[in-house]
């Protein structure tokens, strides 16, 4: 059987960026991908600038549009807009985007095994055996980068799912020339267009990506809310063509660990999407970089790599996710208090979110106290 130092399951942004970092340092790395690239991937495709800064190569060929200005709406009364010198959000289609990162990894020596579905995972004293639909391979490390469903995590021993998975529905929509002209230059988020969540309109090169997501795992008719958003908010009555894609987004990290038996979880498999925006690409790449650093610094020692990876997560990612989780619950479930604050501080909040999108700040660790102080100050002004 062919042996690899590191086997990465999945060629999305987390897996491909991990392969890139490892291959750059001469680590014998393989990406095992069940499909043939490029392949369609359900995703709004809004890639924030902090994620772009993590990739050390040009993305010009796969970016469909760039937006320095982002609009946030809460009904018809509250509207906030932020503008930055660098693009806050760049639009990508995941087939070409993921394929590019994978190609960059291959250029550095990583192996890509397409059309290889992982069917089994066995731990031996000195290595792991990967059973695939096209043959078996051995490796010292497995990186589970196979998304929200992550069959690899289940095979490795994560039997119960401790992440928080939220429902989302996204459409690739072709509209009339007139409607496309109206919406092709605006990135728009509409808070409360769906209960406990938001709708979005992301312009791509020749169409719109429009969707809805709720942070509550309740029974909701997502299609109804999408249709209402499309017609009532965006005013789009004539749809030339649309492709529907339902999916789940993990907006809370696992509580039962990120490493078992030399299997490391990253990206959506670990539950690293942003709890407020549900944006997952930037943290997927970040976690891929962190696991690559841990393996490299450990000099391929499994125990050291595990300790280093967990330490890096604790320092660079988990505190922000915990603050984001609290803020998300408050933001989407305490609408009355939220709207009172946003009437006064809404632009400040939007600017802070833009800074987070650019990687210039993170969610504050003392978010509860900060909101309490804002409320206290607001009440004092009213009296």
Image (spheres, helix red, strand yellow):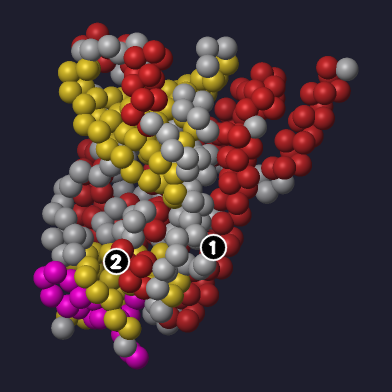
Which residue is the site of mark 2? Answer: 8
Residues 168 and 77: in front is 168
For disc 2, the neighbor class at 10 Å (few under 14, some 14 to 19, many from 20) is many
As drawn, is 313 to the left or to the right of 213?
Answer: right
Q: In the picture, residue 314 is in which quadrant?
A: bottom right
| Relative height, residue 374 to residue 295 (above, below) | above
Residue 90 rendering spot, x and y as whole percentages:
36, 33
Which residue is the site of mark 1? Answer: 255
As drawn, is 327 to the left or to the right of 68?
Answer: right
Residue 165 rendering spot, x and y as whole percentages:
44, 49
Which residues, given as a range, are shown in magenta? 125-141
User: In the drawing, what numbered circle is on residue 126?
Assistant: none
As drawn, is 364 to the left or to the right of 374?
Answer: left
| Circle 2: element type | strand
Magenta stretch: helix, strand or loop mostly: strand
Q: Are marks 2 and 1 in contact (CB under 8 Å)?
A: no
């Amino acid at each position: 059987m062919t042996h690899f130092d590191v086997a990465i399951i999945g060629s999305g942004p987390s897996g491909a960026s991990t392969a890139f970092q490892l291959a750059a340092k001469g680590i014998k790395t393989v990406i095992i991908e069940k499909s043939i690239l490029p392949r369609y991937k359900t995703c709004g495709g809004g890639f924030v600038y902090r994620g772009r800064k993590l990739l050390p190569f040009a993305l010009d060929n796969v970016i469909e549009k760039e937006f320095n200005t982002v609009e946030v709406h809460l009904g018809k009364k509250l509207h906030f807009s932020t503008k930055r010198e660098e693009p806050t959000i760049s639009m990508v289609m995941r087939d070409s985007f993921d394929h590019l990162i994978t190609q960059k990894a291959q250029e550095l020596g990583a192996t890509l095994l397409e059309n290889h579905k992982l069917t089994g995972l066995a731990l031996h004293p000195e290595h792991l055996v990967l059973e695939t639909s096209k043959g078996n391979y051995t490796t010292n490390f497995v990186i589970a980068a196979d998304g929200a469903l992550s069959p690899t995590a289940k095979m490795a021993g994560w039997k119960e799912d401790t992440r928080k998975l939220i429902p989302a529905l996204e459409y690739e929509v072709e509209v009339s020339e007139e409607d496309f002209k109206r919406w092709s230059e605006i990135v728009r988020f509409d808070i409360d267009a769906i209960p406990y969540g938001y709708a979005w309109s992301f312009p791509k090169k020749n169409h719109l990506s429009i969707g809805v997501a709720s942070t509550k795992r309740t029974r909701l008719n997502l299609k109804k809310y999408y249709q209402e958003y499309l017609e009532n908010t965006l005013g789009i009555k004539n749809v030339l063509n649309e492709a529907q894609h339902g999916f789940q987004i993990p907006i809370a990290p696992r509580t039962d660990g990120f490493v078992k038996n030399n299997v490391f979880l990253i990206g959506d498999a670990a539950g690293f999407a942003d709890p407020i925006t549900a944006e997952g690409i930037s943290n997927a790449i970040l976690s891929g970089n962190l696991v690559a650093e841990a393996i490299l610094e450990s000099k391929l020692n499994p125990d050291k790599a595990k300790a280093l990876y967990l330490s890096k997560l604790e320092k660079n990612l988990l505190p922000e996710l915990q603050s984001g989780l609290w803020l998300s619950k408050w933001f989407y479930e305490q609408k009355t208090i939220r709207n009172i604050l946003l009437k006064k501080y809404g632009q400040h909040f939007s600017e802070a979110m833009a800074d987070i999108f650019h990687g210039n700040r993170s969610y504050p660790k003392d978010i509860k106290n900060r909101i309490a102080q804002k409320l206290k100050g607001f009440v004092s002004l009213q009296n």
